[in-house]
């Protein structure tokens, strides 16, 4: 009987706590890292295959991207594309782009190769794990589907940056300034 009473009291406490908290979802605040930026591509949908032309087996040009729903207070953007399925300890980095101006709402197909590393206006291309600046498309070992995570960072400041930054350098500089992120995942498998 005593254990039944304990259970009833516990259930009553849970119901009371839920009623007190209300059934409203948590509200996202401007500085909250959970604010979601919308990141899309007209070339592929989220968690769908990346067309061959955007890979190392094709033209190896960057896919078209668009973004929206930036958090209030966003000053600048940065983008990293990496492959966590690469057979190594750290994800393989395919694209690092930073100092993306707030006025840009996307990047057209081949954008990475149309920019210089130190364009005075607009984004700067960082160094990928191929040892080059800009975009390097998927080229995984044959036989396994790899996932390519496109992550756009909304930052609350203009980064004091140098050309040729790596993913690690960019994230170190940006870590205290991220207002929100957007993710788009593409897949690719070499047969």
Image: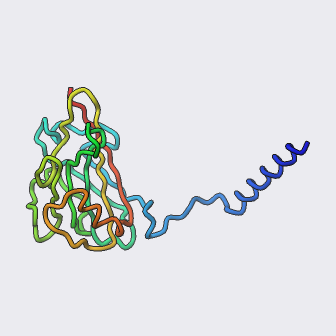
Q: Residue at x 82, y 52 (%)?
A: 9
Question: Which residue lies at the image location 25% right of the left edge and 50% below the top edge?
Answer: 81
| 68 vs 1: above or below | below
Q: Nearer the viewer, residue 49 or 180?
A: 180
Q: Position of residue 15 (x, y in %)?
A: 75, 54
How many tags in the picture? 0
Residue 30 lies, in percent from the top left, at: 44, 70
- Check the picture and name the quadrant holding the N terminus: top right
Q: Is the residue 37 above or below the residue 103 in the image? A: above
Q: Position of residue 57 (x, y in %)?
A: 13, 35
The residue closer to the viewer here, 79 or 7, is 7
Q: Quadrant of residue 58?
A: top left
Quadrant containing the C terminus in the rendered view: top left
Q: Is residue 7 left or right of residue 176?
A: right
The single residue placed furthest to the front in the displayed view is 89
In the image, taking residue 56 as reference, residue 16 lies left or right, namely right
Q: Residue at x 36, y 59 (%)?
A: 181
What colour scheme has been applied to the protein in the rendered image? Answer: rainbow
36 or 78, nearer to the observer: 78
Residue drawn at the location 13% of the way across and 43% of the way down: 60
Task: Return the x and y of residue 43 as percentages of the image width and height.
Answer: 24, 44
């Amino acid at each position: 009987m005593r254990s039944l009473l304990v259970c009833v009291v516990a259930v009553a406490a849970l119901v009371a706590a839920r009623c007190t908290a209300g059934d409203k979802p948590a509200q996202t605040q401007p500085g909250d890292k959970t604010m979601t930026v919308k990141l899309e591509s007209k070339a592929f949908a989220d968690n769908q295959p990346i067309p061959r032309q955007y890979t190392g087996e094709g033209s190896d040009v960057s896919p078209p991207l668009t973004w929206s729903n930036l958090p209030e207070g966003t000053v600048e953007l940065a983008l990293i594309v990496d492959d966590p399925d690469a057979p190594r300890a750290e994800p393989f980095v395919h694209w690092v782009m930073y100092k993306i101006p707030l006025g840009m709402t996307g990047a057209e197909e081949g954008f990475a190769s149309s920019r210089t590393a130190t364009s005075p206006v607009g984004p700067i291309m960082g160094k990928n794990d191929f040892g080059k600046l800009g975009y390097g498309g998927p080229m995984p070992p044959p036989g396994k589907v790899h996932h390519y995570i496109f992550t756009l960072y909304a930052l609350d400041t203009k980064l004091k940056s140098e050309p040729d930054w790596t993913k690690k350098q960019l994230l170190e500089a940006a870590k205290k300034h991220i207002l929100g992120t957007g993710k788009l995942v593409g897949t690719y498998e070499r047969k």
